[in-house]
Image (tube, grey):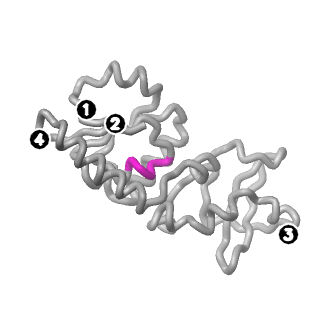
Amino acid sequence: QIVYEQPVDNERISVLEDDSTSLSQPTILSSQVSCTISPLKASKNPLQKYYHQRYDYFSLFDEGIQIDEEGWYSVTPEVIADHIAKEALSIALTAAKSEKTVILDAFCGVGGNTIQFAKYFDRVIAVDLDASRLEMARNNAQIYGVADRIQFIHGDVFSVLSEVSEEINLVFM
């Protein structure tokens, strides 16, 4: 595996890459790793346009946010995730049989929506099949100070749904 750092408009992007140049391993971006690559290889970086939008995805990106390649393509921008969370809470309160609000994030990924849900719901159950992405979500939730409101479950959401004993107000897929 090769770790390289690419200067981008006075910013730096570090990418973990295997020998086939596909990003198959979780990619943690930070400015702590330092080495250089050729400009030709840098121009082939498919994540560059997403990296420029990193603060749209996570306003606290520089605090140690972890994200893999799939996360760059699938994470909901923070402002949109916040809006979704508010709307979800409104729906959950309308349908709630108790005062406690619980949402299950069926495919939490690196935690973009999960973090926003935790700001509004009493409890969030975050499920993902990929253990490394679940750990990234846990790390990211800690950065936002909401990890204590989230239960992280590694597994298939359909199995988890049949095993969860508490009342869930809403399932987000």
Say which residue label 2 marks. 104
In this rendering, which labeled residue sits more in front, label 2 or label 3?
2
Whether pointer 2 and pointer 1 mark residues with C-beta atoms closer than 8 Å, the reply is: yes
Could you say whether the residue bearing mark 2 is in a helix, strand or loop?
strand
Which amino acid type corresponds to the residue marked 4 in the rendered image? Answer: Glu
Residue 24 position, x and y percent, is: 71, 42
Residue 154 position, x and y percent, is: 45, 31
Whether pointer 2 and pointer 3 mark residues with C-beta atoms closer than 8 Å, the reply is: no
Q: Earlier in the sequence, mark 2 or mark 1?
A: 2
Residue 52 position, x and y percent, is: 62, 68
In the image: residue 26, left or right of residue 129 = right
Could you say whether the residue bearing mark 4 is in a helix, strand or loop?
loop
Could you say whether the residue bearing mark 1 is in a helix, strand or loop?
loop
Which amino acid type corresponds to the residue marked 1 in the rendered image? Answer: Ile
Given residues 82 and 71, the one toward you in this image is 82
Residue 99 is marked as 4
Say which residue label 1 marks. 168
